[in-house]
Amino acid sequence: MSIKVNGKEVDWVENETVKQLLKRMKYTFPLVVVKVNDEVVPRNLFDQVTIPDNAKVDVIHMISGG
């Protein structure tokens, strides 16, 4: 059982939330957009939405600059 995070295959953890996955993957960017199976997960639901087995997860960190 596995999921793909930004194209990399990683172990799937039952009942793992988006927030827990970000912590496990060491994504510490202050501004991120997360898509699970091509659906954007609202930031306020990161600690409620769980990642299903075989999911495709895209984590996009926002960069600002000038």
Image (cartoon, rainbow, N blue to C red):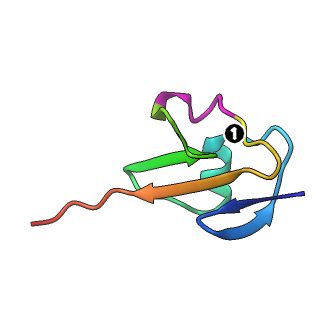
Q: Place residue 63 in its image quadrant.
A: bottom left
Which residue is painted at 62% across and 53% down in the image? 57
- Viewer-side residue, 38 vs 49: 38
Q: Is residue 45 left or right of residue 53?
A: left
Q: Residue furthest bottom?
A: 8
- Viewer-side residue, 8 vs 16: 8
Quarter holding the N terminus? bottom right
**Please, what is the dominant secondary structure of the magenta stretch?**
loop
Within 10 Å of disc 1 (Cα), the crowding (few <14, some 14-19, many 20+) is some
Q: Is residue 2 left or right of residue 49?
A: right
The percent position of residue 27, horizontal first and vertical second, equals 53, 60
Which residue is painted at 21% across and 60% down in the image? 64
Which residue is painted at 48% across and 32% down in the image? 42
- From what the image shows, is residue 56 above or below residue 65? above
The residue carrying mark 1 is 17
- As for residue 64 lying within the magenta part, the answer is no
- As for residue 45 lying within the magenta part, the answer is yes
- From what the image shows, is residue 3 above or below residue 17? below
The percent position of residue 22, horizontal first and vertical second, equals 60, 53
Which residue is painted at 44% across and 47% down in the image? 33
Q: Is residue 50 left or right of residue 36?
A: right
Q: Secondary structure at mark 1?
A: loop
Quarter holding the C terminus? bottom left
Q: Residue furthest left?
A: 66
Q: Residue furthest right?
A: 1
Inspect the image, locate mark 1, and give the three-letter code of the amino acid beneath it: Thr
The percent position of residue 2, horizontal first and vertical second, equals 83, 59
- From what the image shows, is residue 41 above or below residue 28? above
Boundaries of the magenta span: 44-49
